[in-house]
């Protein structure tokens, strides 16, 4: 199983970016998919999660600006980031709780990070 993230980059304050993360491999089912971020000299923190049923959870500072969505048929999770602020600058990581074909329990997989820089 592999998670491939894309969509990071450099954007000015107030701008928007859309991140995507696609899971591939011998997947039977995916439960929660989410995004975390890690800024320099800070711990990794939750940004947003979304269950397969559509329930969402957002970190307080991004609520109302970021939207997490999923395409379950494509095993892909997206993060639409609007009204970006310099404090949103971080490496963004996706993750997913995946049940592999033939397995008996869900395992959390992580994608590689994608850099988001908000600067003028």
Image: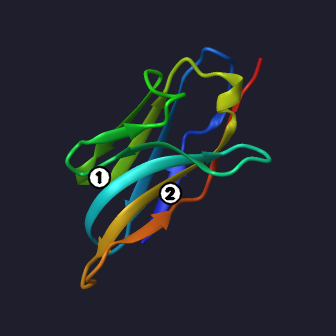
Image coordinates for residue 46, horizontal then vertical, percent:
52, 46
Residue 27 seen from this side: yes
Q: Judge from the rendering whether residue 106 lies leftward or rightward of residue 13; answer left or right.
A: left
Q: Examine the rendered structure and indicate whether residue 15 appears above or below residue 17.
A: above
Q: Judge from the rendering whether residue 81 lies leftward or rightward of residue 78; answer left or right.
A: right
Residue 10 seen from this side: no
At 46% from the left and 44% from the top, the residue drawn is 20
Image coordinates for residue 98, horizontal then vertical, percent:
34, 68
Count of labels shown? 2
Q: Quadrant of the N terminus?
A: bottom left
Q: Nearer the viewer, residue 50 or 28?
A: 50
Quarter location, residue 12: top right
Image coordinates for residue 112, horizontal then vertical, percent:
59, 58
Q: Which residue is mark 2?
A: 4
Q: Which residue is mark 1?
A: 74
Alpha carbons under labels 1 and 2: distance apart: 12 Å
In the orientation shown, which residue stands out farthest toward the left?
53
């Amino acid at each position: 199983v592999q998670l491939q993230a894309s969509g990071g980059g450099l954007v000015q304050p107030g701008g928007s970016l859309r991140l995507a993360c696609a899971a591939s491999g011998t997947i039977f089912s995916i439960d929660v998919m989410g995004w975390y971020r890690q800024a320099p000299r800070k711990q990794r923190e939750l940004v947003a999660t979304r269950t397969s049923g559509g329930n969402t959870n957002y970190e307080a500072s991004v609520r109302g600006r970021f939207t997490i969505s999923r395409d379950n048929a494509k095993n892909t999770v997206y993060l639409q980031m609007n009204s970006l602020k310099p404090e949103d600058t971080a490496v963004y990581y996706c993750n997913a709780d995946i049940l592999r074909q033939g397995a008996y329990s869900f395992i959390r997989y992580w994608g590689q990070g994608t850099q988001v820089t908000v600067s003028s």
